[in-house]
Amino acid sequence: MRKREHSYHAFDYVLVGAGPSAMGFLCGIIELHQGKEQTAAKNFSICVIERGNLPPCNRDPKKWFQDSYSLSSCCSSLVKATLPASRDTVIPTGKGLGGGSNINACVVMLPSANDFESWPSPWRESLLSYTQNLQTQDEEQRIRNQSQIHFETRFPSFITEVPLSISKKEDGKYRRVNYYESLVKPYLNEASPVKITWLHGIQVERLLFDVKDESRVVGVECQEDSGSWMKIRANLEVILASGAIETPALLIVSGIGPELQSAPCRKNLPVGYNLQDHIMLPRPMFHLPWTSGELSPNSVQAIFNAKDSNDRFQLLLFDAASYPHLLPHFVASQFRRRAPNRWPPFAQSIFQYVVMIFFHLVWLLLHVLLSCTPIYFILRYCVVSSGISLVTTKSRGCVKVLRDKQQYQVPCRRSQCQVVVEKCYLTDDRDYDGLFHAMKIFDKLCQPWYRQALFEILPGKWTRLFFRNERDWFRWYSSNFSLPYFHWGGSCGMERVVDRYLRVKGITGLRVCDASVMPTLPSVPTALTCAGLGYGLARIIFEEKDNQNQTMKIQEKAKP
């Protein structure tokens, strides 16, 4: 799979991004061709443009967190984000063939039918069946992690066999299987009916518009790693599948979005707003040595889903498989704080510089301690973490594009801008109430197991002594220690930015197919749902082309 020469510049469809939604789309296109269900688009040519290079990802699933946040990682890019309590962080976005499935925790769980109640047709009725079909595409490559954590509970719905997109080698080692390998690669051979051109190591800088019709997208402008520029034309459509953060950024720099950010503004749409994510609260506890069983491939030992009349929750139990990579980042990140706005700019800059130095020193110290001393073995056998997650959050953030004022008067490019995520977590008080309720539910659920703990590491019972009531304590705890769950979506939502067929409103020749179009997030990790969106879009396109062909045939017959 080598990088193509510049002579390849015109295709029927240009697919920007190679994440789960793009892989689902390609899988659907190939399936429809092979099954001969439709013949309208028999000779599609598709160009897939991916900013990441090969190889796509680290094969060791235990290192998923390290790959997510490493500055030298070939499978992720980092975007600045703000958290409650004046905390700063960076969030990873996937790169390479497979996109986000190169850096996630490899969990593959089906959404529920209730997740799509507020979605428009045809997704409300069909998306669940699409995800079910994709989950069984390559079942033999996947394993179910059998939990080694044992505790008494009268709730039988704990998922102790977590489905993972991981295979097991003959030597007993686990290997990550991303969505490219599981959904598309098995179909690629010399007899493949679909012509797919792969361009990797190429950054799409902006969309290109028809000079005679500024509401029609005709292609993309790209820059290679070598610095050379190229233009790729789409004879039919450009499909953006770059994720809930990169897709709105690309739309905004191309002039599709809020007037204050897009310049020149071609179409005023609420691009970047309504960004959502699940949120998680960590709760590690120290036990006497609790198991001699083997560690999980990716730290996830068991999952429990719960709901009430208003919210849905998730409890995850983690072991120490990823502790050497996860704990140093989590602890050091507690020191990444923003300077008060009332400080002068130079003081804020100095503060941020000192904070970043301190962050890296703490991270390095903890990484050495966990990797080179017996401390890891204590964590391995004596510490179990639970993560309490609210999966029906009410808080809404936004994706913003920051650039120099002079660039507002000329066409802008993605590489000239900085993208930030703002106000996505705990900006709505109902999320505090939902998390508090979730904690109470899981305290009752896991009471026998919690009782076996010698002490609670975080937040610690002693911290409650400093607050007048439990609500105030919980607000402090969740504001200072809550974490992103890395399931972003909604920034180009259906019926707001795109229609139900994923076409950008007021723009022809352009669709969006990734987590950004989700009206609401599913109650499980979003990768499989994204792949289902792509799979469904393939069917929509085939149906449209088939209808067009039938109309043309009728018109030809009606001619004298």
Image (tube, helix red, strand yellow):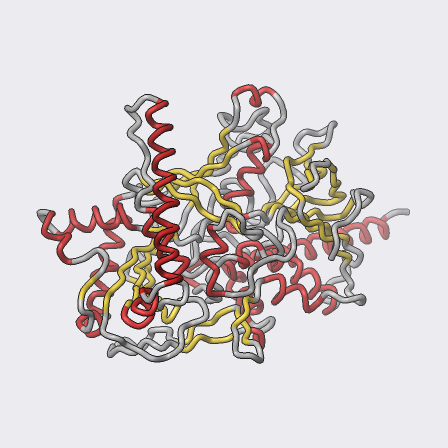
Residue at the image point whose x is 72% and y is 32% from the top: 210
> Looking at the picture, does residue 418 appear above or below residue 287?
above
Residue 286 locus on image (x, y percent): 23, 67
Displayed quadrant of residue 375: bottom left
Q: Residue furthest right?
A: 560
Residue at the image point whose x is 56% and y is 22% from the top: 408
Displayed quadrant of residue 27: bottom right
Numbered disc total: 0
Is residue 192 visible from the viewing direction of this image? yes
Residue at the image point whose x is 65% and y is 40% from the top: 204
> Looking at the picture, does residue 421 appear above or below residue 526?
above
Front residue of 11 and 504: 11
Residue 202 locus on image (x, y percent): 67, 44
Give the quadrant of the N terminus: bottom right
Left/right of residue 555 with respect to residue 71 in the rendered view: right
Left/right of residue 135 with respect to residue 520 in the rendered view: right
Residue at the image point whose x is 56% and y is 45% from the top: 499
Left/right of residue 307 with respect to residue 35 in the rendered view: left
Displayed quadrant of residue 102: bottom right
Residue 32 locus on image (x, y percent): 70, 64
Front residue of 151 and 369: 369
Front residue of 291 and 150: 291
Residue 382 locus on image (x, y percent): 27, 70
Is residue 304 visible from the viewing direction of this image? no
